Image (spheres, grey):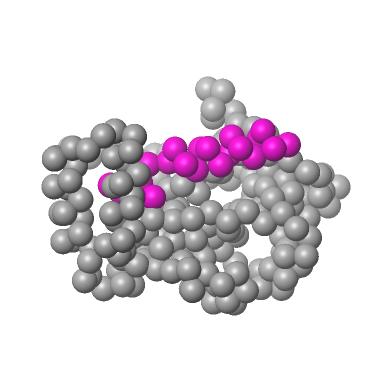
Amino acid sequence: MEFLEHLNWRYATKAMNGTTVDDTKIETILEAINLAPTSSGLQPFEVLIVKTDELKEKIFPISNNQSVIKDCSHLLVFTAWDDYTTERINEAFESMYAVRGFSERWDEYRKFLLNTYIGRDAELNYQHAARQAYIAFGFAIAAAATEKVDATPIEGFDPDALDALLGLREKGLRSIILLPLGYRDAENDWLIDMPKARKAKSILIKEID
């Protein structure tokens, strides 16, 4: 019930007050991202942290002039791999072997993934990677709520312009979604007092035989 209370507390904050979020809270959110499950454990994404006012100002017009971009404490930019490559898959498994030790079973699985992803349409691979980034994004939202840190999901931005600004394509990345973290500005947020509106669970969730 305590977790659900945290989720009921959170909302898509429309105005933030510029207060800095404590590093320990940010680290909790980042660790939740790192612990999120992803397909085959590949974690095919990167999260960039923007803290400087200068860079926030540059991202602001790219993000439809949404005030939380400038007034947040930390802006997380979720990016996904633009494609699966042999090098990326092998690096993921080498990292796993460093923790778990080498396993013939896992190495066979590595070869299976190489046969599955390599040579497949790059856009298809990117879309798959983006879905994994969204899983981690969900964990970040939930973790922020437990830390009583406000967070605002933002898809309303120009990804091509942001990719160019941050030089993402050269790194084999594409921007997916933004997550400003900070604290609500109670006096200027028009959404703050509105009750949470959701579908009835009977409509959203159905048991099937």
Residue 76: percent from the left, percent from the top? Answer: 61, 54
Q: Relative to the observer, which residue lies in front, 36 or 148? A: 36
Say which residue appears at 26% left-offset and 73% top-offset: 121
Q: Residue at x 67, y 33 (%)?
A: 24
**Is residue 73 found left or right of 167 in the rendered image?**
right
Rendered position, 89 above or below 159: above
Residue 86, image x, y percentages: 27, 62
Specify the quadrant that holds the C terminus. top left
The quadrant in which residue 67 appears is bottom right
Q: Is residue 43 left or right of residue 53?
A: left
Q: Is residue 80 left or right of residue 161?
A: left
User: For the magenta stretch, what is the residue range?
Assistant: 22-43
Q: Where on the picture, by quarter, is residue 130?
A: bottom left
Question: Residue 3, relative to residue 129: is it above or below?
Answer: above
Q: How many marks?
A: 0
Extreme-top residue of the structure: 1
| Image location of residue 145, percent across then percent down | 61, 36
Is-magenta flag for residue 26?
yes
Residue at image coords 58%, 56%? 48
Residue drawn at x 13%, y 40% as measured from the top left: 104
